[in-house]
Image: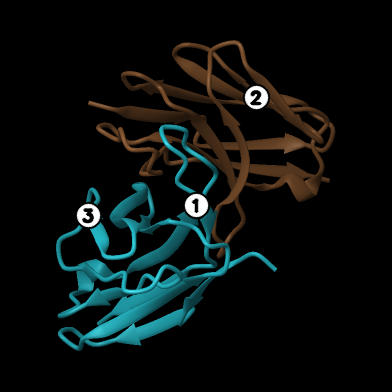
Chain colours: A cyan, B brown
């Protein structure tokens, strides 16, 4: 089954304790990205990756890191989480086809609470 | 600056009562407008992509249309299972590489009452 898998689904952590949210896709997609979703603000892009070893900032990258060492995996790293990073996080992937934008597949989400 | 505005924020319909959701956008050189459905606690699920003004796409009770300034998602004779938040998105400004950096609206929360 084609899917994007995020782990964990729920996480409560304390301020400053480094954490990683994993994302894996099985569709051989070149493109992967991370979004956060907050009430009233909608989905906002954090980071994206066009392919292995190629990553770039989205609209709200502060406080986050990513890496793309393998095509299927795109982990999101919070080196020193703060309460304002409490949010619902989504990983997405899609094919990259020239200048045509294709549908993105989203994971089930990770609800992060930083206390 | 690119903008995507959805209206209304919330909509309650009786089962069978048809209506439309609106997504207005201001972006130079539109390269696709996307509609997604999101159920509570889940990730967005792709519905449609529209690429040019005048284009229409249908799926069951849903039909999406596109003009030069806005898109509509028409829901015909909705059922309770159509209750969800409907999101529209456009490729982000400056995206010239075929990437999929989507700029989302805040969505319309649809509730269909039996």
- Looking at the rendered structure, the secondary structure element under dot 2 is strand
Q: Position of residue A27 (x, y in %)?
A: 57, 62
Tell me the SS state at disc 1: strand
Q: In the rendered view, would you say B105 is above or below A112?
A: above
In 3D space, how far apart are the residues under numbered discs 3 and 1 (Cα atoms)? Answer: 16 Å
The chain holding disc 3 is A
Q: Disc 2 versus disc 1: distance between alpha carbons?
A: 28 Å
Instruction: Report the residue marked by disc 2.
Output: B20
Decide: few, some or many residues near mark 1? Use Cα within 10 Å; few <14, some 14-19, many ≥20.
many
Labels 2, 3: front one: 3
Confirm whether circles 2 and 3 share one chain: no
A88 vs B96: above or below: below
> Few, some or many C-alpha atoms within 10 Å of disc 3 (few <14, some 14-19, many ≥20)?
some
Q: Are marks 3 and 1 in contact (CB under 8 Å)?
A: no
Q: Which residue is mark 1?
A: A94
Residue positioned 67% across, 44% down in the render: B111
When asked about the image quadrant of residue A70, the answer is bottom left
Q: Position of residue A42 (x, y in %)?
A: 39, 48
- Kindly identify the residue that appears in the image at 42 percent across and 41 percent down: B106
Side (left or right) of B56 relative to B70:
right
Q: Is residue A4 above or below residue A106?
A: below
Q: Are marks 2 and 3 in contact (CB under 8 Å)?
A: no
Q: Quadrant of the N terminus of chain B?
A: top left
In this picture, residue B27 sits left or right of residue A56: right
Q: Work out whether residue B16 or residue A99 is closer to the camera in this orientation and state it.
A: A99
Front of the two marks 2 and 1: 1
Residues tagged 2 and 1 counted as in contact (Cβ below 8 A): no
Q: Which residue is mark 3?
A: A56
Mark 3 or mark 1: name the one nearer the start of the chain.
Answer: 3
């Amino acid at each position: 089954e084609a899917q994007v898998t995020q782990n964990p689904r729920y996480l409560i952590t304390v301020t400053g304790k480094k954490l990683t949210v994993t994302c894996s896709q099985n569709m051989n997609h070149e493109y992967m990205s991370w979004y956060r979703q907050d009430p009233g603000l909608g989905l906002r892009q954090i980071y994206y990756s066009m392919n292995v070893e190629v990553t770039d900032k989205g609209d709200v990258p502060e406080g986050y890191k990513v890496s793309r060492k393998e095509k299927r995996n795109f982990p999101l790293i919070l080196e020193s989480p703060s309460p304002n990073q409490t949010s619902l996080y989504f990983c997405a992937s899609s094919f990259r086809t020239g200048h045509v934008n294709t549908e993105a597949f989203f994971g089930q989400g990770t609800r992060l609470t930083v206390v | 600056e690119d903008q995507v505005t959805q209206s209304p924020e919330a909509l309650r319909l009786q089962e069978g009562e048809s209506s439309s959701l609106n997504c207005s956008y201001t972006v130079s050189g539109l390269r696709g407008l996307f509609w997604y459905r999101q159920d509570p606690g889940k990730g967005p699920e792709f519905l449609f992509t529209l690429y040019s003004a005048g284009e229409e796409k249908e799926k069951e009770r849903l039909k999406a249309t596109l003009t030069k300034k806005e898109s509509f998602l028409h829901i015909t004779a909705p059922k309770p299972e159509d209750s969800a938040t409907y999101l529209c998105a456009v490729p982000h400004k400056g995206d010239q590489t075929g990437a999929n950096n989507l700029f989302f609206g805040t969505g319309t929360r649809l509730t269909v009452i039996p």
